[in-house]
Amino acid sequence: MTISAQFDAKTIENKWYEYWMKNNYFHSEPDQRTPYTIVIPPPNVTGVLHMGHMLNNTIQDVLIRRARLKGFNACWVPGTDHASIATEAKVVAKLKAEGINKNDLTREEFLKHAWEWTDKYGGTILEQLKRLGASCDWERTKFTMDPDMSAAVIKSFVDLYNKGLIYRGYRMVNWDPEAKTTLSDEEVIYEEQQGKLFFLKYKIEGSEDFLTIATTRPETIFGDTAICINPNDERFTHLKGKSAIVPICGRVIPIIEDEYVDVEFGTGCLKVTPAHDMNDKTLGEKHNLEIVDIFNEDATLNSFGLHYQGKDRFVVRTEIAKELEEIGALAKTEIHLNKVGTSERTKAVIEPRLSDQWFLKMEDLVKPAIKSVLQTGEIKLHPKRFENTYAHWLNNIRDWNISRQLWWGQQIPAYYYGDGKEDFVVAENIEDALTLAREKTSNLKLETKDLKQDVDALDTWFSSWLWPMSVFGGIMDPESEDFKYYYPTNDLVTGPDILFFWVARMIIAGYEYTGEKPFTNVYLTGLVRDKQRRKMSKSLGNSPDPLDLIEKFGADGVRVGLLLSASAGNDIMFDEELCLQGKSFTNKIWNALKLIKGWEVSETIPQPESSKVAIEWYEAKLQQALVEIEDNFEKYRISDSLMAIYKLVWDDFCALFLEMIKPAYQQPIDSVTFAKAIEMLESNLKLLHPFMPFLTEEIWHIIGERTPEEALIVSTWPELKPFDAKLIADFENSIEVISGIRTIRKEKNIAMKDSIELKAINSEKFSTYFDSVITKLGNISAFEYVSEKVDGALSFRVKSNEYFIPISGGNINIEEEVAKLNAELVYTQGFLKSVQAKLSNEKFVAGAPEKVLANEKQKEADALAKIATIEQSLAGLK
C-alpha cells in the first residue's frame, strides 16, 4: 500500500468512522463477558458542541475504547436532555418572532411547536460528537422525553408520592421572572453586586414622629405589612404597641417585636414583607401578618403597586427613590455590597415568591448517598477533594422543589376533581386517577372529563436523576435483561458544577430504587479556560468552535492537545498550541510508519547484535511504561497516562529504537528485526488507540491486511509481563555515552558519516551489553576498554567513567582546537581570579549569607576542575 506523504486527517476520519459504524463495533448486547458501562451526561437537546463537551466526551471515549481493548463488553449510552427552561425559552422566542404569544396557545399547540423545534435542532450535538470519534452505542440513544423515559419519570413520581415523600405545599420559592418558573435552591447562583442601601422614613401613626428603616429594595414597600423592632432595643421602647404608615401607599401597619431583628444592622428596625422574603415570611407566620404579593409573574408590579403598576421592578426602584425623596421620605442612600440570587439558566435576578409547589422530602433519601461516598467509599470521586463539596451540600440538604411552571417536560401526574387544595389524586394515567378519585370521594358518577391534570411540569433534573436506570428500562422493568446486566454502570465523567444537580441525585435515586450504587467512579473534569484563565463563553468571544479545531488539526490532534493538560478536576488553560502539539505528534507517528515501511527487508542477512539488544531494551521499556500507564488509569490520571505513552512513542520508539535498528543507507533490514519492529509498532498503536483512534486504525491496516474481526478497535490491550529493570537502567548509561560522543562530534565538527575510535576507562563497571548500540549510534570503528588515560585524545565523563576519542584521520584542525582551548583557559582563569578575590575579602566572607558563600565556593571548585580538564586536553594535543 502506498503511504501518502502527509497524514490526511479528514479523509481518514470519515473512512474509519463509517467502517466502525458499518461493522457495528460500538453496539453492545448482554453476553458472557464482563460489562463496562458509561452513560453520557446528556447535553441539552438543542445544544451544540463546545469545548467542555469536547473534553468530557474525549475522556469518555478514551475509557470506553480502552475497555473494549481489554475485552470488556463496552457500552456507552448516548442521549440528550429536554432541558425544560432552556428549550422552552427558545421556542417562546421563536414564536414571538413569528408574532405568536405562548399564552394564546393551548398546551397541546405549544408542545407541537416544541416538538417541531426539537426535531429540527435536536440531536445536532450527537452528530457533532461523531466528528470527535465518539464510539457511543448509537442504537441505544435516549432522549429524556422519549415515551418510555417519560413513563419512568411519572412512575417514579407516583411511587415517591405513595411513599409519603412527595407533598404539595404553599412555600416561599425561588422565582425566575424571565423563564416564569420556580427554581430549586441549587439552581440559584449568589453573586456579590454593588447596589444601594435606602434609608426610608415611616411616619408613626397619630404623631409627627417617624422611624427610619434601611432596605436594598424600596419598591417592596407596597408589600410591607409590619415593622419589627427588637424588644431589647431601648431606642424603640416608646414604639411598642404603635403603628406606622407606609410611605406613598399610606397603609397602616403594626409595629411588632421580635428578637430576630439585628440591632446592629441598618437602623435596628426591619420592614416586614412576608410575600417577598423568606425570613419575613417566617416572621409573618409567627405574628399572623397579612401577606401582600406585589409582583406579577414577570416581576412587574401588580395593582398593589398603584401608579407603578405594570412597570419592571428595577425601573420602579429608580423611580420610587426619586418620589420618596420628593415627599421627604428618603433620609439618605449609601453604597452597599449585597449577595444577589440569579438564575443559573437565564441569569435573571431571582424573586422570592409564595406559591403552591410540589416538593420531595430529602432528609432520609440522602442518607445512603452520604454513606456510600463519605463513609464506605463504595463510590469514589476523582479527585477526592470534591468530597468536601459533596458533604457540604448533602449534609445541609433541603426539600427539593420539583415542580416547574412550564409546559415542556413531563406533566405532573396529579389530577384535581374539586376546588379544595386536597381535592386531587396522583396516578400514572387518567384512568387510574379516575378510579382513585371515585374511591376517595365515594362518587361513582365522576368521569375523566371531571378531572383536570396539574398544569405544571417536573424539574428536568427529576428526569435525569433516573438516567443510569431509565436508559436500560430499570424503572419500568427492573427485571429486564439489559438492566440486570449493565447496571450498576462503571464510570461517570462530568463537570464539578453539576456534582449536586445531577451526580448526587443519581446516587440518591440509585439507592432508593435498586439499593445499589448507580456507578463506581465519578471523574470530575475541570473547566476549559482561555490563556488568561477566563471561562470560555460566547459573550467573551474566547471559545473556539470545536469543529473548526478538528478541521484545522484533525480529531486526533485536538484530542491529544486537550488531554495532555487535562488532569482530573483541574481547569485547562486552553491554547491552540496544544492542538498543534497533538498534530505534530500525529505527524511524528506517521513519519515513523513511512520510515519502517520504506525499508527493504532481507530474509538472508543475519540480525545485528545492536538490533537484538535494541529489541530487548524496547520490550522492557514498553512494559515499564505499561505499568505506569495502568497505574495512572487506575487513579483516573488520564492525562498522565497519555503523557507516558507520548514519551514512550516519541522519545523511546521514534528517537531511539528506530535509530538503533535502522539499516545503513540503501541497505536492507533483516527480517527478524523488521518483524519485531512491526510488533512493537502494533503494541504502540494499541496503547495510542483510545487517545488517537483514527490515526492508529489507519496505520494498523497499512502495516497488515486485516479482516473486520482483526480491526484495531477490537484487538487486545498489551499484556503486562515481567521485565528487566536493570536492562533499562544500564541502557540509560549507554545513552549518556552516546550523548557525550555526539556532543564532541558537534563541538569539533566531526560529521556522523566519519567513523571514530572510542576508548574507555570503566571505573563504574558499566554493563557492556549495549556496546554494540554505542558503536552503531556513535559510528565507532573500534571500541576498546583501557586502564589508563589516553594521550592525544578528546575526552568526556559519564559518572566516574572516562571516554576518549583519539585524534586521528584529520577529523579536527589541531591548531584551531589549541587556540580555542587556550582562549577558554584564559577566560576561565580570569573568572577564577574574580571568584577568589571575593573569597579572600574578609568583609564579604563575614557578611555574606551561608547560601551565597557556598555558591561562590562551588564556582571556585568548578572553575578549578574546568582549568584542569582544559590543561589536560591541551597536553593531549601537543
Image: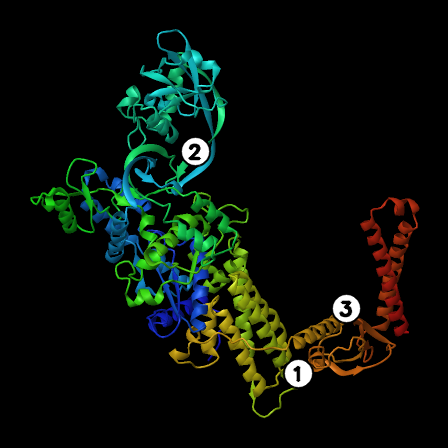
Q: Does residue 868 sit above or below 787 in this rendering?
A: above
Q: Say which residue label 1 marks.
A: 610
Q: Of helix, strand and loop, which one carries label 1?
A: helix
Q: Residues within 10 Å of mark 1 (few under 14, many from 20)?
A: some
Side of 677 relative to 246 (left or right): right
Alpha carbon of mark 3 to alpha carbon of mark 2: how far? 67 Å
Residue 129, quarter of the rendered image: bottom left
Task: Name the residue: 28% across, 22% down.
Answer: 304
Label placed on residue 747: 3
Q: Does residue 563 sit above or below 784 in this rendering?
A: above
Side of 348 relative to 777 (left or right): left
Foreground disc of the pair 1, 3:
1
Residue 353, quarter of the rendered image: top left
- Lower sequence index among marks 2 and 1: 2
Alpha carbon of mark 2 to alpha carbon of mark 1: how far? 71 Å
The image shows residue 290 at horizontal and vertical percentages of 29, 23
Foreground disc of the pair 2, 1:
2
Question: Along the line of sight, which residue is nearer the eye, 704 or 470?
Answer: 470
- Amino acid under label 3? Glu
